[in-house]
């Protein structure tokens, strides 16, 4: 009634390591895989039907093979989702890189002007100085003065 473990199964037929320690650089997915292997080892089953198959459905609910097949299916699904995520992430990085290359190529052809010096003007409030947060340029007695306030200063006349 049971079938051997499928060739594409991520679980090594009960031959995997017990989960006593986890490598310090292991990813969450690797830890999950190690845990599934350890749980199947603890069940002491070496073959089980594929999850959702007719032989699997005929198993009694408390048969350890039901749990082993469920763990295998969950691990296969996790790996499938991980592959989808990694592929999408790679495609997104490629799009960003391509967009950056287009911008870099375009930069040489677009006209840009040099930045202008910020100048305070009579009758207007102080102006923020780019690159200097909290500092403002004031016009005091005809002089351009930088101060850490945006309150208009009195001119001494």
Image (cartoon, grey):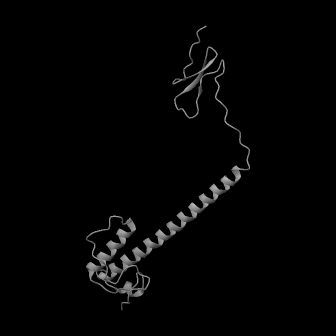
Question: For residue 76, what is the image quadrant?
Answer: bottom left
Q: Position of residue 94 (x, y in %)?
A: 59, 62
Give whichever of 49, 41 is nearer the camera.
41
Q: Position of residue 3 (x, y in %)?
A: 38, 90
Residue located 32% across and 64% down the image: 24
Q: Position of residue 67 (x, y in %)?
A: 33, 78
Give whichever of 9, 93 is nearer the camera.
93
Give whichever of 116, 72 is nearer the camera.
116
Q: Is residue 93 left or right of residue 108?
A: left
Question: For residue 10, what is the image quadrant?
Answer: bottom left
Count all numbered tags in the image, as a single digit.
Answer: 0
Q: In this view, does 45 lie above or below 118?
A: below
Query: Quadrant of the image for the N terminus?
Result: bottom left
Residue located 56% across and 35% down the image: 131
Residue sitting at the far bottom:
1
Residue located 33% across and 85% down the image: 59
Query: Quadrant of the image for the C terminus?
Result: top right
Q: In this view, does 82 lie above or below 66?
A: above
Residue located 37% across and 70% down the image: 30
């Amino acid at each position: 009634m049971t079938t051997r473990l499928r060739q594409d199964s991520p679980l090594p037929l009960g031959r995997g390591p017990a989960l006593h320690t986890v490598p310090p650089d292991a990813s969450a997915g690797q830890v999950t895989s190690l845990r599934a292997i350890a749980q199947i080892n603890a069940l002491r089953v070496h073959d089980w039907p594929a999850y959702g198959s007719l032989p699997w459905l005929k198993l009694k609910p408390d048969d350890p093979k039901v749990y082993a097949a469920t763990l295998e299916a969950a691990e296969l699904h996790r790996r499938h989702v991980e592959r989808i995520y990694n592929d999408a992430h790679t495609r997104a990085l490629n799009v960003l890189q391509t967009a950056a290359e287009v911008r870099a190529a375009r930069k040489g052809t677009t006209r840009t002007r040099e930045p202008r010096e910020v100048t305070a003007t009579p009758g207007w409030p102080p102006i923020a100085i780019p690159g200097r947060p909290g500092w403002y340029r004031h016009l005091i007695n005809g002089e351009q003065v930088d101060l850490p306030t945006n309150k208009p200063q009195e001119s001494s006349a």
